[in-house]
Amino acid sequence: MGNDTSAYINKVFDPNARKALSELLERVAGSTDAYPLYVDEAFTTALTIAADGTTGIAITSAFSGSNAISLAGTGSAAGVNISGNHTVGVTIGAQTTAGVAITGATATGVSITGSCSTAAIQVGVSGTAAGDILAYGATAGCSMRWDASDDKVVFTRTSATATATNLMTAEVLQTLTGASAVNTAEAFRSVLTSNVQVGNWANAILGKIDFSSAGFVTGLAGAVCGELDMAGVTLGNGSYCCFEAELNAPASCAGWGTSVPVAFMTGNAWGAGVAEFRDDGFIFNFTGVGAATSGKIFQANTATAASHALRILIDGVAYYIMLTETGA
């Protein structure tokens, strides 16, 4: 023990207490026992640090044990409870493996139940990357990662499953249970905002299937699927569709035409084998419309001449689809 510590011990009036305290401090400072400081009775607070200081408990780099602090009991409400007003509750400096590691089976690894004024979990400072956050899945090669250097979330999934199952990398579930005549609902929203030239192309949502060199399906493959499940009741109002296209034309817009085409839908066929599509492909592929029948959605109409037309653009040339107001 240092001279300063001895001076404090010498102020203890009872010689037996002074001796016991001295032996205890000697044991804590130099003992190689499993528990240099051991509390084996029920207690309210095992260690209290009431006075101001720089460090309440310091475990320096000279410590080479397995656990700097070990919480092995099972009856505590909280392993570590930080209830005071602190600028930082826990600070973890330079480390090599993990700042906090939870390896055992727990009900909740990390539980944050209080009201956090800034963030429940904060990694780094805005504008300053602090490393990626990685969450592994049950299957090797599957993970969710925040790419701090590229400012994006990356979902990675690898599957060799050949059985009948639905494979999804991400799923958004939103259930509405309150009837409303004024709400709007969007289960997923993707907004790309730009007031400058974006580049060669831009997509708010990109749906792509890459069959590589030998991939295929035995059913239907669609890069984007719009599916609408109608209610099994008599409809009283509303408008329903599998795909909705909205185009906002502000008052100052101008310059539209064949050189700057603006349309509800654009189709581009490309690739080294595009001639095969031109020879045997289709602009649309509809099933379920039934045979051409009078009064149905698909009609054979030869009695009335065309009175209207829709303009379409094919390879930069405007063409017109003839229409009539009279059904068969």
Image (spheres, rainbow, N blue to C red):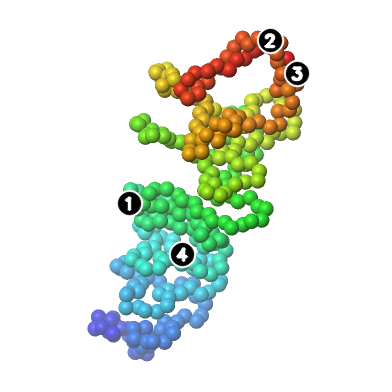
Instruction: Name the residue beneath numbered marker 2.
Output: 304
Spatial distance from mark 4 to mark 2, Cα to Cα? 83 Å
Q: Earlier in the sequence, mark 1 or mark 4?
A: 4
| Local SS, label 3 | loop
Q: Is residue 214 visible?
A: yes
The numbered mark at residue 178 is none
| Local SS, label 1 | loop
What's the residue at 52%, 48% (across, down)? Answer: 212
Residue 53 image-quadrant placement: bottom left
The percent position of residue 287, horizontal first and vertical second, equals 68, 32
Which tag is nearer the camera, tag 4 or tag 3? 3
**Amino acid at dot 2:** Thr
Spatial distance from mark 3 to mark 2, Cα to Cα? 13 Å
**Amino acid at dot 3:** Ser
The numbered mark at residue 294 is 3
Q: Earlier in the sequence, mark 1 or mark 2?
A: 1
